[in-house]
Amino acid sequence: MTGNALNQGLEDFIGRGYAHGFVTDIESDTVAPGLSEDVIRFISAKKGEPEFLLAWRLKAYRHWLTLREPRWAKLHHPPIDYQAISYYSAPRATPGLKSIDEVDPKLLQTYEKLGIPLHERARLAGVAVDAVFDSVSVTTTFKDKLAAAGVIFCSFSEAVREHPELVRKYLGTVVPYRDNYFAALNSAVFTDGSFVYIPKGVRCPMELSTYFRINQAKTGQFERTLIVAEDGSHVSYLEGCTAPQRDENQLHAAVVELVALNDATIKYSTVQNWYPGDEEGRGGIYNFVTKRGDCRGANSRISWTQVEAGSAITWKYPSCILRGENSVGEFYSVAVTNNLQQADTGTKMIHIGRNTRSTIVSKGISAGRAQNAYRGLVKILPTAENARNYTQCDSLLMGARCGAHTFPYMEVRNPTAVVEHEATTSRIGDDQLFYCRQRGISTEDAVNLIVNGFCKQVFRQLPMEFAVEAQNLLNVSLEGAVG
Amino acid sequence: MAVSGLRVEVGGKEILTGLDLVVRPGEVHAIMGPNGSGKSTLAHVLSGRDGYVVTGGSVSYQCRDLLAMAPEERARAGLFLGFQYPVEIPGVSNVYLLRSALNARRAARGVSEIDAAGFLRLVKAKARLMQMDESFLQRGVNEGFSGGEKKRNEIFQMAVLEPVLAILDETDSGLDIDALKVVANGVNSLRDPARAFVLVTHYQRLLDYIRPDFVHVLAGGRIIRTGDHTLALELEADGYEQILAAASS
């Protein structure tokens, strides 16, 4: 294949529209743009929050004022005007819906378009869905079944009302509000998110799933998710998101905190497909996310799996603090960037306890003029006797104008540690494409085939129905990528 | 397939200089020639690989202009190339590739996709034919295969895809005698009045096991001599030099 034909193919690819670009017309209860202590008090009051939470938000806000945006990532974007963002918006639905029939039909249609027929999907897959539309939870299913097992799965706001002692005990213990610029902002203004609590010895009877979706112009989304797994418990949580097309950049700064106590396992899977912006880099979501898991107990395990396909900018490092003895941290990632998308993503594995182990498998795919960076830290503290890490970091390039970058950091302060790092960078080869085409497979299908093969190690970690979705997402994302 | 007066350049250099070849259904042709004579160029240009500029001549295949067809169209019309150097496609299982290929062909013919059970029966039977362990089916395409395994895999794919015209590019190179027999056996079992083969090879030894109907000597970018299978034996005995000298005199 000639270079020109390849580039032409990439131009076609770049011309592809965003399948999930539409906006639902629902009246919203939106606060005027701008951020101040008054806005934070408004949010807190609107949600009927206890005093401790408001105090915490205000401390976070005051700390945030002293911080500057981080600049170390390999990302470039125009300055974000934090005063131009509206920090609260809620769809005008009557609160406390008893059944799905009471949900605004337009809202349900939106989910349909996204391929998430809530009731059907939930029933078929046996998945409990806590659907977040903008900032307020709209509907929650399967609550009874979970309640019977003693599992708490609800919106963050509900958790604040119903289980304030749990929220107070764990909130900010993994990602303190002082952690970083975006975590501080989130702590000050978060409006909703999900809360999961798995009691001692309980294996959560179903996969937990939340779909996030931004649908308000100039509304940043600031989710806060907290998952606590008590001794000997087990939970698998799925998060998937798509966002409608917008001309203006939208800020997304979520915080996810996981706490795994003795012998507990948390598996957290994400398929992220926020609007990536158009072919000229206009619009698209700025995704600045802080995700961290704390393997607080002995023999605990936290596993992150992510498929990052959307967003104009992705700044995200789901990490594990391996505090408990014999605890295990895992990070499996596929990050796809296209057009002018930029991703700087990876993980941190902080080994503190003895015999702690971590595995990192990162697959970056870059096309168009996109930049894709893996940034990872493996830190072995002096207390971490016999720590083990294995890192594998592969990049796949499509076309000649994109970039792949790898920034692995290692800090080993215990001589018994074994740390391995493997990295490869490859291009989808003309010879691979020709081989497939000679067998009768179209170029497009061949690209999908090769890309899915490249990502297989990560897809295998996803729950079955998500693996299929992820594969479809990549296929759609790479339509006509190479001609 | 009728190739007439085919001229092909690679990087500004003329490799094929007016090649004529007619292949009818049921025939087995062997194309032999010294290194650099244009054997692989012929295989590649017939299968539609990029980087070859056709400057003259034509190729008609099933009454169509083969050179105007995309590689996948040629494949769906029954043209198969057994690669000299099959590529690895990590993470894509052999069966997945084959099923995609088979269904693409079926779709082109307006036939519905093959069902999972039928497909499994088919590939297992063909794997037995090629004396391949079933574990090969689930392994990544050519991933970590030895040279011999890759070649055997090519013939296995051919057996599954049942082409109308199979061009095997140096399929015998790098094979030990046992593998060579398996490959030859695979080809022989697929011989059919409706199916033609073009065997591109440097050595005669493959032809000990697959008896061709025609042997062509390719040199300087065109066919300088055509004969039956005894021509191959002559080549083996006398070497290319003598035939080339005879042709140029």
Image (cartoon, coloured by chain):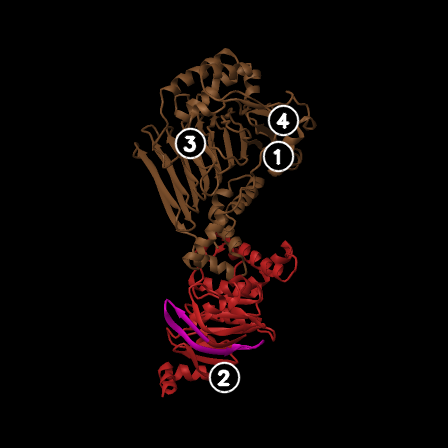
**Colour of chain B in the image:** red
* Point 47% across, 80% down: residue: B215
Judged from the image, the secondary structure of the residue bearing numbered disc 3 is strand
Amino acid on which the number 3 mark rests in the picture: Ser
Q: In this figure, which residue is indicated by the disc labeled 3?
A: A319
| Residue at numbered disc 4 | A139
Magenta-drawn stretch contains B55: no
Query: What residue type is disc 2 on?
Result: Asp
Q: Are marks 2 and 4 on the same chain?
A: no
Q: Quadrant of residue A97?
A: top right
Label annotation for residue B228: 2
Query: Of B230 and A382, which appears nearest the observer?
Result: B230
Residue A111's disc is 1
Say few, some or many: other residues with alpha carbon within 10 Å of mark 4 (under 14 / 14 to 19 / 20 or more).
Answer: many
Q: Give the Cα separation between the discs numbered 4 and 1.
A: 12 Å
Q: Does the magenta stretch include residue B22?
A: yes
- Figure chain in brown: A
On the image, the x and y values in percent for residue A323 come to 40, 27
- Which quadrant does the N terminus of chain B fall into? bottom right
From the viewer's perspective, is the residue at label 2 or at label 4 nearer? 4
User: What chain letter is assigned to the residue under label 1?
Assistant: A
Amino acid identity at mark 1: Tyr
- Marks 1 & 2 on one chain: no
